[in-house]
Image (cartoon, grey):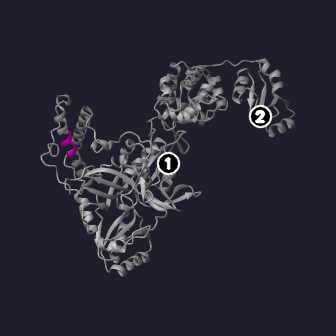
């Protein structure tokens, strides 16, 4: 156990009523910084390793903030200061570093005959031995090196000879010592397993799903992916921890694994409590079977146990192959198959605003794939299956791809209800049949899709704002609502990667030009569910924008082709305060939806299109003709006056026109006979 720093005023009941920083001279600041670093490192040890803090969280925060203030004011930064655990500048790349000694893999098997054969070979060579029995952590292995008692570097296993330098990331893990006690060896290289606790993994996945990001498949992938990130600040924000289990190399004299563990504990390293010494292979097998029964109750993932010969002289005599030591063996658990526990039920908001309940699971192997979540589709299915948090469930991979809960085999707690408000934006939630939708078009979970739709050609027709640009603007925080588009400025756009002055100016010009827009096009651009271009034009013909904002379901049902589902979707959309505020901001920004009066130049004319007419989109032609009294339909009938046959036409409509005796017009004849009249 690490000893408490002597005569340090910031260890027990610290006085945090500090004098102003500008009243200290540099010598006084250096002395206070030294005491604060020693105290904070001790508090980290007590909290993250011993799980026995000696001060309150608020007092710790005040000590930490004081240390940061002094380091900044007097330029006393140090890469091994506790303040560096919050993460530093992003890295350009991870450098490759050679290991102190090769990090070999282990022989492994889940068969009892294999572990007994391993023991027989050892006994034949060196006689009977004791074994160190340890959990086999399902995490990410790292080598951590200390020089003169200070953290020097952390390296991934890599190919066993060389690995990637992940020092900046591992330094953020608070259970990793940055300084060792004064009696530490001059040189020490240890091996540990970085892992993500189960509770932290579930919370991380919950946050990712709510943001619309893909969740991690399992805690190991989450830990491995995090350790290799190029942004230490992101790493510091993720729930990583570590267990140390080997002394790879040291200037100290060690004779046995038990002495290595004692040294690790004495120096403040976190060693797993399940580690023990057993007398023989039968005890190893019993140990493995016990941990296999208890693994679901552990806060970390294990996939077996490791047995190591305790005595180092015996290890030396046994030696190693090119791939693994002959004195260690990983006795693995069988893969979990199909049954697991529902840890939590959360609600994911898709890019269309659809709310989908998702079960976050204790990771389980299903047909060779690790599953940590499963869709529950909707509230009705949850009720039908009886899925509850804490329930044991059986899974299947639908079509061998999407995991689904197919049966509850035991228990669970409470009941699940779909939320009344969107879990991402707190916007209104509307139910349609068995499904629920967020009605806020500016909801972050669906904002990218809404932005792309708003700028599309049939909508506001803003060139230069495709999927990639939309994602970039949202991720940069420049767009949190569709109305933010018209607040963009040249400097903010030029500051984005890949943008120059010309592209910024082009986009701003497109935005300005888009402000004069037909009301039907504007309604379509808002992205109201079930309202396509034709329905948007019909709504624009029946209502002004102010009237549409206040329209009831009954008002809307009076419009042709507006049924109950469409009417409810429109009312729900404008019942959202966020949507109304967004529309008002768009109008304040200068967007002017113009209600076009319906003319009578083409009154009574029914037209159908097949193929494309050069110079126009289908939506533009439909709007133009309907504005002047024509009726544009999608299928040919005896009521059709003309079938306009453009480029790359289909055959079905032409065959129908021939059967019904409907006249056909090519693009030139169409312009002469019909467009010339408007």
Cβ atoms at labels 2 and 1 below 8 Å apart: no
Q: Which of 528 and 278 is in front in this view?
A: 278
Q: In screen coordinates, is 93 left or right of 626?
A: left
| Residue 262 in the image: above or below residue 612 | below
Q: Is the magenta stretch mostly helix, strand or loop?
A: helix
Please say whether residue 436 is one of the residues in the magenta stretch.
no
Q: In which quarter of the image is the C terminus?
A: top right
The answer to whether residue 269 is visible is no
Q: Give the Cα separation between the discs numbered 2 and 1.
A: 43 Å
Name the residue that disc number 1 marks. Answer: 379
Give the number of marks: 2
Q: How crowded is mark 1: few (under 14 residues within 10 Å), some or many (20 or more)?
A: some
- Look at the image and tell me in which quarter the N terminus lies: bottom left
Question: Quick one: label 2 or label 1, which is nearer the N terminus?
Answer: 1
Task: Measuring from the top left, give residue 399's x and y in whole percent.
Answer: 59, 57
**For the view shown, which residue lies furthest in the left direction?**
7
Confirm whether residue 334 shows in the render. Answer: yes
Give the side of residue 559 with respect to residue 70, left or right: right
Task: Write down the region rendered in magenta.
Answer: 33-38
Q: Position of residue 30 (x, y in %)?
A: 19, 38
Q: Which mark is residue 107?
A: none
Q: Under tag 1, what secondary structure?
A: helix
For mark 2, what is the residue? 611
Q: Determine the residue positioned at 50% across, 24% down.
A: 488
Q: Which of 136 and 572 is in front in this view?
A: 136
């Amino acid at each position: 156990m690490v000893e408490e720093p002597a005569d340090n005023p910031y260890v027990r009941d610290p006085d945090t009523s500090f004098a102003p920083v500008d009243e200290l001279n540099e010598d006084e600041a250096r002395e206070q910084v030294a005491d604060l670093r020693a105290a904070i490192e001790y508090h980290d040890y007590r909290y993250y390793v011993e799980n026995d803090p000696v001060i309150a969280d608020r007092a710790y925060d005040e000590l930490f903030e004081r240390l940061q203030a002094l380091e900044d004011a007097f330029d006393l930064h140090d890469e091994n200061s506790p303040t560096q655990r919050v993460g530093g500048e992003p890295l350009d790349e991870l450098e490759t570093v050679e290991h102190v000694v090769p990090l070999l893999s282990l022989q492994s098997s889940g068969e009892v005959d294999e572990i007994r054969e391993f023991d027989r070979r050892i006994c034949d060579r060196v006689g009977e031995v004791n074994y160190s029995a340890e959990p086999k952590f399902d995490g990410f292995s790292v080598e951590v090196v200390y020089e003169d008692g200070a953290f020097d570097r952390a390296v991934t296993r890599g190919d066993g000879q060389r690995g990637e330098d992940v020092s900046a990331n591992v330094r953020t893990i608070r259970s990793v010592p940055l300084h060792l006690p004064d009696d530490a060896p001059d040189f020490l290289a240890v091996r540990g397993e970085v892992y993500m606790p189960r509770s932290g993994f579930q919370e991380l996945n919950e946050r990712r799903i709510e943001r619309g990001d893909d969740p991690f498949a399992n805690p190991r992938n989450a830990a491995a992916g995090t350790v290799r990130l190029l942004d230490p600040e992101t790493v510091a924000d993720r729930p990583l921890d570590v267990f140390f289990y080997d002394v790879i190399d040291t200037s100290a004299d060690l004779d046995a694994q038990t002495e290595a563990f004692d040294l690790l504990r004495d120096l403040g390293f976190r060693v797993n409590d399940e580690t023990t010494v057993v007398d023989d292979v039968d005890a190893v097998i019993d140990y493995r079977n016990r941990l296999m029964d208890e693994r679901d109750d552990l806060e970390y993932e294990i996939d077996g146990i490791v047995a190591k010969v305790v005595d180092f002289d015996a290890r030396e005599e046994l030696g190693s192959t090119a791939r693994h030591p002959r004195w260690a063996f990983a006795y693995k658990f069988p893969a979990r198959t199909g049954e697991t526990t529902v840890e939590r039920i959360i609600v994911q908001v898709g890019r269309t605003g659809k709310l989908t309940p998702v079960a976050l699971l204790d990771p389980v192997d299903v047909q060779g794939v690790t599953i940590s979540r499963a869709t529950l589709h909707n509230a009705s299915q949850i009720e039908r299956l009886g899925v509850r948090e804490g329930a044991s469930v059986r899974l299947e991979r639908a079509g061998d791809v999407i995991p689904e809960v197919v049966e509850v085999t035991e228990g669970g707690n409470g009941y699940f209800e779909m939320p009344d408000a969107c879990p991402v934006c707190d916007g209104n939630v509307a139910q349609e049949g068995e499904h629920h939708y967020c009605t806020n078009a500016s909801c972050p979970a669906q904002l990218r899709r809404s932005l792309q739709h708003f700028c599309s050609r049939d909508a506001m027709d803003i060139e230069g704002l495709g999927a990639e640009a939309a994602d970039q603007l949202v991720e940069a925080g420049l767009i949190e609502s569709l109305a933010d588009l018209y607040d963009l400025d040249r400097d903010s756009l030029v500051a984005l990667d890949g943008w120059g002055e010309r592209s910024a100016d082009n986009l701003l010009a497109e935005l300005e030009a888009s402000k004069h827009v037909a009301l039907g096009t504007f309604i379509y651009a808002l992205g109201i569910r079930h309202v396509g271009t034709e329905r948007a034009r019909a709504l624009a013909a029946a209502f002004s924008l102010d009237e549409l904002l206040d329209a009831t379901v009954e008002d809307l049902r009076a419009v042709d082709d507006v049924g109950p589902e469409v009417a409810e979707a429109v009312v729900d959309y404008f019942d959202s305060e966020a949507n109304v505020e967004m529309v008002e901001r768009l109008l304040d920004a200068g967007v002017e939806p113009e209600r076009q009066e319906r003319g009578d130049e083409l009154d009574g004319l029914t037209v159908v299109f097949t193929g494309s007419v050069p110079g126009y989109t289908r939506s533009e032609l439909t709007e133009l003709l309907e504005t002047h009294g024509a009726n544009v339909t999608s299928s040919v009938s005896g009521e059709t006056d003309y079938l306009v046959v453009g480029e790359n036409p289909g055959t079905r409509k032409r065959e129908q026109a021939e059967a019904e005796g409907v006249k056909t017009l090519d693009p030139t004849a169409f312009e002469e006979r019909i467009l010339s009249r408007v």
